[in-house]
Image: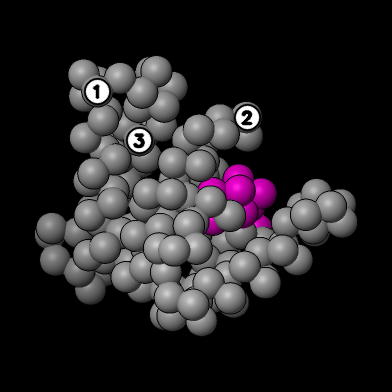
């Protein structure tokens, strides 16, 4: 559903499909490479956080690729996705993006794990309440009734 990452009405600065996948690979590479500060992939973390602040839909698309490329046992990468880029996405675009984020969490267990790591103190109370209450049911669905 979210594999479509092109937007014909955008200018040439819009990230192309290959760039989205490269940013996702670099982000995951940071976690797979031991999270060292001297890794070139470290810069992907800041780039993705800025993208999530500046362009909610494009940030979401990269986060979607990351969540669905990450191995399910890569908890650090999924938690980092939630406490970093997804936190920025919800903080800056929460009300308009929340429905899409929750739909993605329903569709992908990895995305649900990452979205569950967004910090309560990072977003407004109304957005948190909706996110928390709906994620509880989504997690229960993914884990067979045990959220």
Q: What element carries label 2?
A: loop
Instruction: Please state which of the two labelled residues, at mark 2 or mark 1, is closer to the viewer.
Output: 1
Q: Please tell me whether residue 126 is drawn above or below residue 133 in the rendered image.
A: below
Q: How many labels does the image show?
A: 3
Residues at marks 2 and 1, CA–CA distance in whole angstroms:
22 Å
Residue 107 place in picture, x, y as percent: 65, 58
In the image, which disc is placed on residue 37?
1
Residues at marks 2 and 1 touching, judged by CB atoms closer than 8 Å: no
In the image, which disc is placed on residue 75?
none
Label 2 packing within 10 angstroms: few (<14), some (14-19), many (20+):
few
In the image, which disc is placed on residue 73?
2
User: Which residue: 51% across, 41% down?
Assistant: 78
Q: Where is the N terminus found, in terms of image quarters?
A: bottom right
Q: Main secondary structure of the magenta part?
A: helix
Instruction: Please state which of the two labelled residues, at mark 3 or mark 1, is closer to the viewer.
Output: 1
Q: Where is the C terminus found, in terms of image quarters?
A: bottom right
Between discs 2 and 1, the one toward the N terminus:
1
Between discs 2 and 3, the one toward the N terminus:
3
Report whether residue 98 is seen: yes
Q: Along the horizontal axis of the image, is 141 left or right of 2?
A: right
In the image, which disc is placed on residue 27?
3
Report whether residue 62 is seen: no
In this rendered view, identify the residue nearer to me: 96 or 57.
96
State which region is magenta.
107-115
- Outermost residue, right direction? 145
């Amino acid at each position: 559903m979210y594999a479509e990452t092109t937007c014909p009405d955008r200018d040439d600065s819009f990230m192309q499909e290959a760039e989205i996948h490269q940013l996702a690979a670099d982000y995951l590479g940071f976690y797979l490479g031991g999270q060292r500060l001297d890794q070139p992939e470290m810069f992907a973390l800041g780039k993705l956080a800025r993208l999530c602040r500046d362009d909610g839909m494009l940030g979401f698309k990269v986060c979607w690729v990351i969540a669905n490329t990450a191995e399910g046992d890569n908890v650090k990468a999924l938690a980092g996705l939630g406490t970093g880029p997804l936190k920025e996405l919800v903080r800056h675009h929460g009300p308009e993006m929340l429905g899409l984020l929750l739909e993605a969490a329903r569709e992908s267990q990895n995305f649900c794990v990452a979205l569950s790591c967004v910090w309560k103190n990072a977003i407004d109370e109304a957005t948190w309440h909706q996110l928390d209450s709906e994620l509880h049911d989504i997690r229960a669905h993914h884990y067979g009734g045990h959220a």
